Amino acid sequence: MGRVRKYLVLAAAFALMAAAVALAYQAAARDRDYRALLARGDTAVRTEDTFAAIEAYSGAIALRPDSMLPYLRRGEAYQRRGELDQAARDFRAAGALDPTATRPIEALGDAFYAMRRFDRAADSYSRYLQLDDRAASVNYKLALARYQTGDVDAALETLAATLRIDASVSDAHYLQGLCFRDKQKILEAEAAFERAIALTPAHVPAREELADLYRAQNRRRDELEQLWLIAELDRDQIERQVALGVAQARAGQDEAALKTLGAVLESTPSPSAYRALGQIWLAQAQVHGERVYVVKALEALGRIASNPDATSEVLTLYGRALLMDEQLEPAELALQQASTRYPLDPASLLLYASVAERQGHLDAARQALIDHASLVADAPDAVPQALRVADLSLKLNDPDTAVLWFGRALRLAPEETRILEQLADTQLRAGDPLARETIARGLERDPGNRTLLALAKRAQ
């Protein structure tokens, strides 16, 4: 019996040892497979095969669901594919598995930012900074997210912390300039953009903002300097050259502008360059009153006005040139098209109204003016335009509409007795019982007004 018991004990020990060896072998094999899958996923990422990468990382997660790393890397693969919801899900899982790891938190913030969920991005970056408040890049990202939410003051506060950590971050100075610009602190904005440029001379967005500030202050020379540098830094972008040409024309340097735009058109038939060229020739025509400039404007604008995707602005310029050349029918057609393209150039409606009226299309002219009034409610010429609508309504034998627009004009210019006289006269024509009230109001202001006295007799 003793031998049997001893044999059984030894057998049990050997069985336990074998089981332990088997488990160790299985663990080693699982760990080997896990590492192999991670390596396969990393290789797939390097070759831009994100689908294979996601498949490999998913296999690694199946083997080690408690490991943070494959969740993080799979999330990054999803992020490369633009599948941001799935990426955010994996970054959250990675962060939950290792709450002290900063990379998943930052990656989650980046995913939220790319999805334009700026509040949630800011929350993620804030959590990161609770673990490491010396990360200048994440401080900057937090400031950017706060700026995107519209919280400019919080963005400035965060940027101050960013620059205390690392004052060489040119993008932080640039963002600081945007914040100051939004708060109408022009001098501070200029200084911030200049610091960004000093750190990174090729910082085109900072130079663009600086050029805009100079333009708003009528600092033409400074604006042109920045635009010239931008065009030199970004020579492959035709629009940079065109912007320089437009600014040169705006500064009265027409010869330089024509040279700049001509150089653009030698290399490519740029619609924006033709548009700018047409604008210059139109301005010359208005200054000198010579048809030769109108012809040049028509030549430049005609090259792009016939394109199916011609903008309302281009068609308006072309219609203006045709109108200056007394080509009324083509002008009316171009301006009618301009008034139906979006984004709409409001000037197209006024020009269309003028040419349509000259062509005897009174109803179309009136509707264009009404559309303009609804689009540009606070226009400086709102009163004369309202009177034009009223006059056209009378010509169309529509006194009721004329009453409405004379009334609108009077509300805009209540001291204009002449408008009050026109309103009262039209109310009488329309049989409006308010005519007597309008006349009485006018006579209170000007008891000796002959027109109103005559209208009072008619009203009796």
Image (cartoon, rainbow, N blue to C red):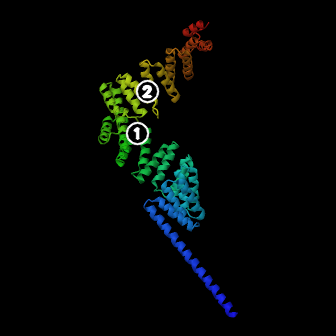
Residue that badge 1 annotates: 219
Which disc number belongs to residue 122? Answer: none
Give the x, y percent position of residue 127. Answer: 59, 58
**N-terminal of the two: label 2 or label 1?**
1
Q: Nearer the viewer, mark 2 or mark 1?
A: 2
State how far apart marks 2 and 1 are (Cα). Answer: 37 Å
Residue 4 drawn above or below residue 278: below
In the picture of the structure, the residue carrying the numbered disc 2 is 336
Which quadrant does the N terminus fall into?
bottom right
Residue at 58 percent across and 11 percent down: it is 428
Report the label total: 2
Residue that extends furthest to the right in the rendered view of this protein: 1
Q: Secondary structure at mark 2?
A: helix
Regarding residue 161, the answer to whether it shows in the image is no
| Residue kind at label 2, given as amino acid type | Gln
Tell me residue 406's x, y (percent): 55, 18
Q: Label 2: how many residues lie within 10 Å, few (<14), some (14-19) or many (20+)?
A: many
Pick the front one: 304 or 230? 304
Q: Amino acid at mark 1?
A: Arg
Q: Which of the image's four quarters has the C terminus?
A: top right
Q: 395 and 224: which one is in front?
A: 395
Q: Secondary structure at mark 1?
A: loop
Viewer can see residue 51 = yes
Task: Please state the horizontal and vertical placement of residue 290, each as a whole percent of the image.
Answer: 31, 25
In the drawing, does residue 247 fall left or right of residue 169?
left
Please say if 124 is above or below 8: above
- Relative image position of residue 17 (x, y in whole percent): 60, 83
- Image vertical order of residue 293 relative to residue 216, above or below: above
Residue placed most toward the observer, 99 or 440: 99
Mark 1 packing: few (<14 Cα in 10 Å), some, or many (20+)?
some
